[in-house]
Image (tube, rainbow, N blue to C red):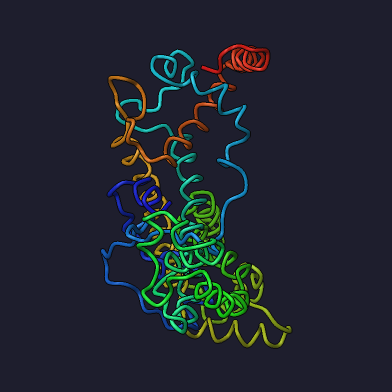
C-alpha cells in the first residue's frame, strides 16, 4: 500500500507548511507560539519508504471505495481508448487536467493517505511493546503470529521464515511472544489514532476542506473591510465583541469583552487586521493550487496520450480514481443506458469486457 500511496502523486511533492496554512484560526495565531517550517520546505502528500505493517493495522471496508465490483466491471470498457473521448470525457484539454478528475484523484489519495498515517502512528505506539520481546517491527511480528498458528516451522514459506527473529524459531516460542504482546497491543487506542489520522489528512490535503476554509476566510475578510480604515482600538474592540462567534471568542459576556479588548490592543488597527487575513487567504489559496497541481502532474505522468489511457504501470489508486471519474462522466453524458446494457448482458451470461 505504501508504494501505491507514494506513487499516486509520483514525485510531485506539495510545498506545504501545515503550521502557516492551516493554523489560520484567529485566536490560535494570537495566543499560541508557532514554529513554522523553513520557507520552501517540502512536505509531501505521500511519504514513501514505509512498508505497511501486515498485523494490527487499519484496513478499508469493501474492495475499492468506488462501489461494487459489478459497477466497476460494467464501466471498465467505457472509458478506455477512444471511448473516453466518445463519451465526452476528455481528461486533458489544452494541457489542463479536468477539474473533476483532479477531485477524484484527491479523494482517493485522502483515503489511502489516512490509512498510511494511521499505520505509521500505530507502528510507533506498538514498537516499545515489540522491543520488550525482541521483535524489530510489525512486519516481523506478523511473521511471528503466523508461526504461532502453524504446526511447525517448515509449514511457513521461505519469505516468512526469513522475517522471523533469531530468538523465535518454533511455534511454542512464537505463541509465548504473541501471548505477551497481545494484551499490551490491545491497550493502544486504535479508534483515536484513526480519528487523528483522518483529521490530519483532511486538514492538510483535502481540496473540499481547504476550499471551505478559504470561503470562510474570505467571508471574514469581507466583514473586516466594513470597518473604517481609521478605526480606533475601541472600534476594534466592539467589532470583536459583535463578531465573537466569527472569531471563535468564547466565554461569558465579561470574558468575551476582556478577550476582545486584549485582541484590539494587540492588533491595533483595521489595516493590520486585514493584513493578517490577507496572509491567511494567500497561504490557503497557495495550498489549494499545490494540491491541484500535484494531482494534475501525477495524472499527466501516468497518462498515455496516444492510447488515451493510463499506462499499465500507473499506481492502482490512480487507476481507481480515473475509473470513478469516468463512471461519473459516463452517467452525465448519457452513458447510463449503455452501462445498464452491459450490466444486463453480463448478468445474463454475456462477457463483462
Q: How many numbered discs, if any?
A: 0
* Towards the viewer: 15 or 214: 15
Res 268 visible: no
In the current view of this chain or complex, which residue is farthest to the right? 252
Q: Look at 58% across and 64% down and name the residue there.
A: 194
Query: How far across and down, in percent of the image, does residue 140 sit?
Result: 42, 67
* Towards the viewer: 315 or 282: 315
Res 64 visible: yes
Horizontal relation, residue 96 to residue 139: left or right: left
Please say if 1 is above or below 151: above
The answer to which quarter of the image holds residue 37 is bottom left
Query: How far across and down, in percent of the image, does residue 157 sit?
Result: 41, 54
Q: Look at 46% across and 21% down and name the residue there.
A: 79
Query: How far across and down, in percent of the image, does residue 145 sit?
Result: 52, 66
Horizontal relation, residue 66 to residue 169: left or right: right
Please say if 71 is above or below 179: above
Q: Look at 45% across and 13% down and name the residue there.
A: 86
* Towards the viewer: 84 or 77: 77
Please say if 42 is above or below 341: below
The answer to which quarter of the image holds residue 310 is top left
Query: How far across and down, in percent of the image, does residue 147 sit?
Result: 50, 64
The answer to which quarter of the image holds residue 42 is bottom left
Amino acid at each position: 500500500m505504501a508504494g501505491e500511496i507514494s506513487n499516486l502523486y509520483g514525485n510531485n511533492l506539495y510545498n506545504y507548511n501545515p503550521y502557516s496554512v492551516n493554523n489560520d484560526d484567529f485566536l490560535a495565531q494570537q495566543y499560541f507560539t508557532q514554529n513554522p517550517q523553513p520557507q520552501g520546505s517540502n512536505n509531501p502528500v505521500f511519504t514513501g519508504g514505509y512498508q505497511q505493517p501486515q498485523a494490527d493495522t487499519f484496513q478499508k471496508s469493501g474492495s475499492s471505495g468506488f462501489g461494487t465490483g459489478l459497477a466497476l466491471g460494467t464501466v471498465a470498457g467505457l472509458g478506455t481508448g477512444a471511448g473516453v473521448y466518445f463519451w465526452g470525457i476528455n481528461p486533458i484539454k489544452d494541457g489542463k487536467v479536468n477539474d473533476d478528475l483532479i477531485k477524484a484523484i484527491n479523494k482517493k489519495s485522502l483515503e489511502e493517505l489516512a490509512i498510511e498515517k494511521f499505520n505509521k502512528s500505530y507502528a510507533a505506539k506498538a514498537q516499545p511493546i515489540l522491543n520488550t520481546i525482541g521483535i524489530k517491527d510489525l512486519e516481523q511480528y506478523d511473521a511471528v503470529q503466523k508461526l504461532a498458528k502453524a504446526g511447525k516451522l517448515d509449514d511457513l514459506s521461505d519469505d516468512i521464515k526469513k522475517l522471523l527473529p533469531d530468538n523465535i524459531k518454533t511455534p511454542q516460542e512464537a505463541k509465548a511472544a504473541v501471548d505477551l504482546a497481545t494484551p499490551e497491543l490491545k491497550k493502544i487506542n486504535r479508534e483515536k489514532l484513526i480519528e487523528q489520522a483522518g483529521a490530519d489528512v483532511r486538514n492538510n490535503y483535502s481540496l473540499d476542506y481547504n476550499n471551505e476554509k478559504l470561503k470562510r476566510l474570505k467571508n471574514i475578510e469581507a466583514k473586516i473591510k466594513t470597518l473604517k480604515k481609521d478605526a480606533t482600538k475601541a472600534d476594534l474592540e466592539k467589532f470583536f465583541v459583535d463578531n465573537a462567534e466569527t472569531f471563535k471568542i468564547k466565554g461569558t459576556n465579561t470574558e468575551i469583552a476582556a478577550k476582545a479588548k486584549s485582541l484590539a490592543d494587540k492588533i491595533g488597527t483595521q489595516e493590520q487586521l486585514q493584513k493578517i487575513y490577507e496572509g491567511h487567504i494567500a497561504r490557503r489559496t497557495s495550498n489549494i493550487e499545490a494540491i491541484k497541481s500535484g494531482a494534475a502532474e501525477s495524472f499527466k505522468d501516468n497518462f498515455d496520450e496516444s492510447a488515451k489511457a493510463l499506462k499499465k504501470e500507473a499506481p492502482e489508486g490512480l487507476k481507481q480514481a480515473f475509473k470513478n471519474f469516468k463512471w461519473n462522466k459516463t452517467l452525465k453524458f448519457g452513458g447510463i443506458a449503455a452501462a445498464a446494457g452491459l450490466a444486463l448482458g453480463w448478468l445474463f451470461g454475456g462477457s463483462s469486457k
